[in-house]
């Protein structure tokens, strides 16, 4: 995950607040401002003061790259602690050299445009950026650039529905997130960790209940749910604070956080689909308000699905999961 750190040119509490509200994970401030910052929110503080979370010179170092020989001062840490890279004049060449040799690099930038370049350099990018600016608009824009850099782009495919089969009672998981989800956005879940349906959020009004655009009724407790960076978690293990990946119909993703996960006994239904020669399944709650996502982003109620209907999903062939971590292996789940 790419990091967003912030350092004001001229310390002002309102700038620190703007950075925190824009998603900064750490702020770099003078030693006499540490206590004030810690009152504002729970955020890591970088400073020379020993009460800082990251003490400069001990937990994090700062290196001015004003000549090529100074690059060795960064490389010698071998990624063991974060290194803030400063340039006398903004240039990307030192960062390119360092990315090829070490990790844990935080590039100092002056605006969101520079941040975007730093995060994409050599396709890998710096591990994070330290924004030095007193402009609230740049703080916000840099936060947005970081979020975009952290979002995966998924290659969603079309599944063809084969059938639905009514089952008995089971334990299903309803996930209430801390975000309002747009139409077409949903979570990825499947009976297999390598093949998942895009389950639409509940932002659709029905005669039976009001819209709940923060909610996804994901499926049985056994289902795999896609997290960020290729990881998965069982639906029944989701709880408050877990970051879950959501995707729109084009595969644009973001991480949202679980506010609560409700496990309740409900009548269940098995959805069967095919992608090429592979069968894909998901056991879900049997209810009209539970929907998959069609290729145009429309919600499709599982109670109205019929053979031949197309819905979106994700297939990641050749991978299994070990404690939720994606690994290359030969595995068959059925």
Image (cartoon, rainbow, N blue to C red):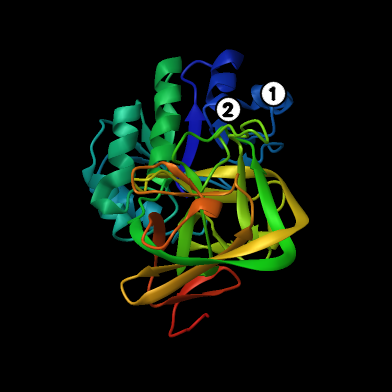
- According to the picture, the residue beneath numbered tag 2 turns out to be 20
Q: Is residue 133 above or below residue 210?
A: above
Label 1: element kind: helix
Mark with earlier residue (1, 2): 2
Q: Is residue 82 above or below residue 135?
A: below
* Residue 223 screen position, x and y as percent: 60, 65
Total marks shown come to: 2
Label 2: element kind: helix
Left or right: 147 in relation to 89: right
Tell me which residue sits at (64%, 56%) in the image.
286
* Residue 78 screen position, x and y as percent: 44, 61
* Residue 71 screen position, x and y as percent: 32, 51
Left or right: 334 in relation to 76: right
Distance of mark 1 from mark 2, alpha carbons?
9 Å
* Residue 38 screen position, x and y as percent: 71, 28
- According to the picture, the residue beneath numbered tag 1 turns out to be 40
Q: Are marks 1 and 2 in contact (CB under 8 Å)?
A: yes
């Amino acid at each position: 995950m790419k990091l967003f750190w912030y350092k004001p040119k001229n310390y002002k509490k309102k700038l620190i607040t703007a950075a925190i509200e824009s998603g900064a994970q750490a702020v770099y401030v003078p030693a006499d401002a540490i206590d004030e910052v810690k009152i504002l929110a729970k955020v890591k503080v970088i400073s020379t003061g020993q009460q800082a979370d990251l003490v400069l010179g001990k937990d994090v170092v700062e290196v001015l790259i004003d000549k090529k020989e100074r690059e060795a001062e960064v490389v010698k840490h071998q990624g063991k602690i974060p290194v803030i890279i400063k340039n006398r004049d903004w240039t990307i060449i030192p960062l390119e050299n360092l990315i090829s040799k070490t990790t844990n690099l935080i590039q100092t930038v002056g605006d969101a445009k520079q941040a975007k370049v730093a995060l994409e350099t050599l396709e890998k990018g710096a591990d994070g950026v330290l924004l030095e600016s007193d402009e609230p608009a740049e703080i916000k824009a840099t936060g947005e650039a970081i979020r975009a850099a952290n979002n995966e782009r998924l290659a969603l495919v079309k599944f063809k529905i084969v059938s639905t089969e009514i089952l008995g009672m089971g334990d299903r998981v309803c996930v209430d997130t801390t975000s309002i989800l747009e139409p077409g956005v949903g979570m990825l879940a499947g009976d297999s960790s390598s093949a998942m349906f895009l389950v639409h959020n509940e932002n659709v009004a029905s005669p039976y209940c009001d819209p709940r655009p923060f909610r996804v009724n994901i499926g049985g407790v056994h289902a795999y749910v896609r997290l960020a960076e290729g990881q998965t978690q069982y639906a029944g293990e989701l709880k408050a604070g877990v970051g879950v990946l959501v995707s729109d119909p084009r595969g644009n993703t973001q991480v949202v956080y679980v506010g609560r996960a409700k496990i309740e006994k409900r009548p269940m239904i098995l959805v069967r689909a095919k992608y090429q020669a592979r069968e894909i399944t998901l056991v879900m709650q049997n209810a009209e308000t539970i929907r998959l996502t069609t290729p145009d982003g429309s919600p499709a109620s599982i109670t109205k699905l019929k053979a031949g209907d197309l819905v979106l999903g994700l297939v990641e062939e050749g991978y299994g999961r070990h404690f939720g971590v994606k690994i290359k292996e030969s595995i068959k789940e059925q």
